[in-house]
Amino acid sequence: MKRETPIAARAAVQSLAASKIRELYNEGLGRKDILAFWVGEPDEPTPEFIRKAGIDSIAAGELFYTHNLGIPKLREALAAYISRLHRKTDPAQIAVTSAGVNALMLASQLLVDHGDHVVEVTPLWPNLQEIPKILGASVTTVPLDFAPTGWTLNMKKLLAALTPGTRVLYLNSPNNPTGWTISREEQKTILEHCRRHGIWIFADDAYERLYFGKGGVAPSFLDGMQEDDRVISTNTFSKSWLMTGWRLGWLVVPPSLVADLGKLIEYNTSCTPIFIQRAGIAAVTQGEPVIEHTRERFHRARDFLVGELRKIERVEVAVPEGTMYVFLRVKGMTDSLGFCKQLVRDHGLGLAPGSAFGPEGEGFLRWCFAADTDKLAEGVARLRSALANPKTDLPNR
Ligand SMILES: Cc1ncc(COP(=O)(O)O)c(C=O)c1O
């Protein structure tokens, strides 16, 4: 019997982009000789004292459901941490989530309706580009401008895109993949504009501690905002404390949203596992040396990689102010996915195609520099030889 309606996902879900990094990964499946810099992940394991806190909690039998918004001790520890870094924050404004991506989805479910208009500064981490689309929002992108001296935000273009009917500005700084970091002056201008038009700001602060500028903490909207501003900050334990696999993050929201956020968490994950939260308490209360160590290591790696890449004639690169990525331009390349496949196949080098971060990323490659210098040096040698080899034609679409 013929079915009247096909068995299929919602149209908004069907039209989500498939992961280009995954496509590339499949290209190199089963090969041991690939030097991979395509995944956005620190290369060191979670420190022992954090793991122990999780293990002790499991051993003590903390294996049951817990609070929707997170256990009070972790919310208090996070409030103290944010108060120290940014502004006086109450534990009641914090919700613990199953990592940063879940925090972003929850914030979006809380405030973005089908048909809403949202704005994003791009190039941008693919997940952030797709989340508003899952909810049926329409997305306007405002691309950063590239020059080897640095990535810059065109404020005029951004403010023009943030029309009075806009619901949310999604802004990730330090930015994955470019490393661009917003200044306090730019934040002030955006805050004033959004305040005037009732536009929400979703600040994705995932890389705020992987910032190589003065003080080691990137400027945050939390610093300059007023009590009643429409600002939500999302964050994660993944990068600062080397905890990608633990899936732990948080949101800072205006107090009036907390009760509804709790309901949403109930219907998404109900709660973050308590033993994961115990590990989080250890990280946030004793983890400053971990952050210092990682930032110093990545700072050295960044300087080394940028220096080496700049010696390659066809490569242009700006110094990233934060994150663990270099977003490099290869002159003459217009099909970054095709080129990345060639790099994997013929040179055993795994980089992420710029087009994975939106059409504005085409012509670029993302290189995660969370690696030792020897590995980075070998990767650069492979890229140099690929670009010098007359058989490596840069695929053009
Ligand atoms: C910009 C950005 N935001 C948020 C995240 C969230 O990470 P997680 O879900 O591991 O917390 C990532 C991870 O790569 C990211 O790049």
Image: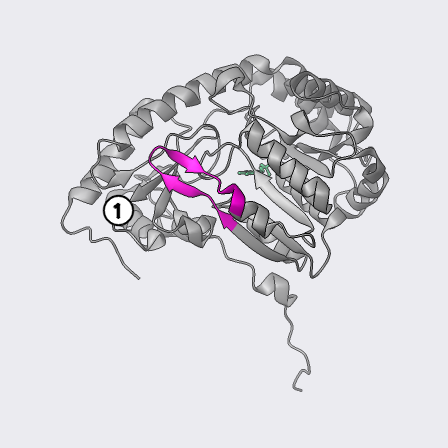
Residue in the foreground of this view, choosing between 251 and 344: 251
Label 1 CB sits under 8 Å from any ligand 1 atom: no
Secondary structure state at the residue bearing disc 1: loop
Residue 352 quadrant = top left
How far across and how far down the image is residue 39, in percent?
A: 45, 39
Question: Image quadrant for the N terminus?
Answer: bottom right
Residue 13 vertical position relative to residue 390 in the rendered view, above or below: below
Residue in the foreground of this view, choosing between 331 and 27: 331
Residue 185 quadrant = top right
Q: Residue at horizontal 44%, vertical 54%?
A: 359
Q: Residue at horizontal 15%, vertical 52%?
A: 391
Left or right position of 47 against 4: left
* Magenta-highlighted residues: 142-156
How far across and how far down the image is residue 79, in percent?
A: 74, 22
Left or right position of 391 against 277: left
Q: Residue at horizontal 39%, vertical 34%?
A: 150
Residue 381 vertical position relative to residue 83 in the rendered view, above or below: below
Q: How many marks?
A: 1
Q: Residue at horizontal 34%, vertical 51%?
A: 336
Say few, some or many: other residues with alpha carbon within 10 Å of mark 1 (under 14 / 14 to 19 / 20 or more).
Answer: few
Left or right position of 333 against 6: left
The colour style of the image is one colour
Q: Is residue 62 visible?
A: yes
The residue labelled by disc 1 is: 331
Question: Image quadrant for the C terminus?
Answer: bottom left
Outermost residue toward the bottom?
A: 1
Image quadrant, ligand 1: top right
How far across and how far down the image is residue 279, in percent?
A: 67, 23
How far across and how far down the image is residue 90, in percent?
A: 80, 24
Question: Within the magenta stretch, is there residue 208?
Answer: no
Residue in the foreground of this view, choosing between 70 and 195: 195
Q: Disc 1 residue type? A: Lys
